[in-house]
Amino acid sequence: MLDTWGMDSPHTQLPSKRILLVHAHPDDETIGNGATMAAYRAAGAAVTLVTCTRGEEGEVLVPALAHLAASEDDELGEYRVGELSRAMLHLGVSDHIFLGAPAHKYRDSGMIGTEPNNRPDCFWQADLEAVAAELVEIIRDRKPHVLITYDENGGYGHPDHIKAHLTAMRAAELAADPAFGVGEPWEISKIYWNAIPRSAIKKALVSKKVIRNIALKIFKYVPSKWITLPFVKPDSVITTAIDANAYLPQKLAALREHKTQLILNGDLFEFSKEMGIRVSGFEHYTCVKGLDQGSPARHAAKGPNWESDLFEGIDLAPLA
């Protein structure tokens, strides 16, 4: 049985606002949602992070730690577990779980089309229904009002991101089905996909050529017809903007803990001497379930008309 917030009486003592995030690897959560997580934790909301793999196939950016790589000692996964734990301390998140825990069942699948995709123990090869069933147990225990994950392309096409999306969406469906499995059904009120609006990315860029150059250098496997980063979306598909800039210091501190994966200089992600992007405490989402249809022009909203609270429109009445 999963621990329920460390409390003796689960349902009546659950925090009144509850968020579940499903991410593929350590560091994904802080890059996309770090300020949001810190802000809601500071406000007293329960924040549960589920990470699907340990990120064993990541590129090691610290020369002194190069031996951790999958091609050498293959110890990067365990090291990134420590990075994640330290990052979560900065964000105030104590409820973070690896899918399939206590065993690390699902290995990082690596980039699309690479040999790690073929390993039978990688997340990409795992049976979707079985993986989703594991997440259902967490959903029914934590009873989140809000789910945050990637879009159907996993943000940028990484197989683990796509699988995390599929797992989260399927688990949300199954968790609400009284005919599935054991435990009390739970329907998640609102589901969000991470997104970055074009207007925000333009403000954050340090070089005008950064989108094109990153797409070529970092996302080589992305189809050539994509001329911008695939997780950068038209403003018209954004529904929600969380102003958590007050928690940018916590986000930056958490990002610095992921030192094997990220090059950070102050508030700047550096891709080269000429390229970089500013880290922001404003984080954006597309709500794909539970958006208040009565709100003015929400689906085609811009700027001031975007939602500013993930819990907007949710009935937060205590559990019976």
Image (tube, rainbow, N blue to C red):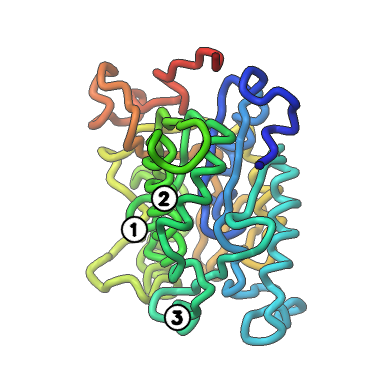
Helix or strand or loop: what does disc 2 sit on? loop
Q: Residue furthest bottom?
A: 72
Residue assigned mark 2 = 150
Helix or strand or loop: what does disc 3 sit on? helix
Contact between labelled residues 2 and 1, with CB atoms less than 8 Å apart: yes
Q: Please identify, in this view, whether the residue under mark 3 or under mark 2 is nearer the observer.
A: 3
Residue assigned mark 1 = 153
* Amino acid residing under circle 1: Asn
Measured Cα–Cα span from mark 1 to mark 2: 7 Å
Binning the other alpha carbons within 10 Å of mark 2 as few (below 14), some (14 to 19) or many (20 upward) gives: many
Measured Cα–Cα span from mark 1 to mark 3: 20 Å
* Residue lying at 48% horizontally and 28% vertically, measured from the top left: 145
Residue 118: assigned label: 3
Task: Answer with left or right where residue 184 lies relative to residue 209.
Answer: right
* Residue lying at 42% horizontally and 31% vertically, measured from the top left: 187
Measured Cα–Cα span from mark 3 to mark 2: 23 Å
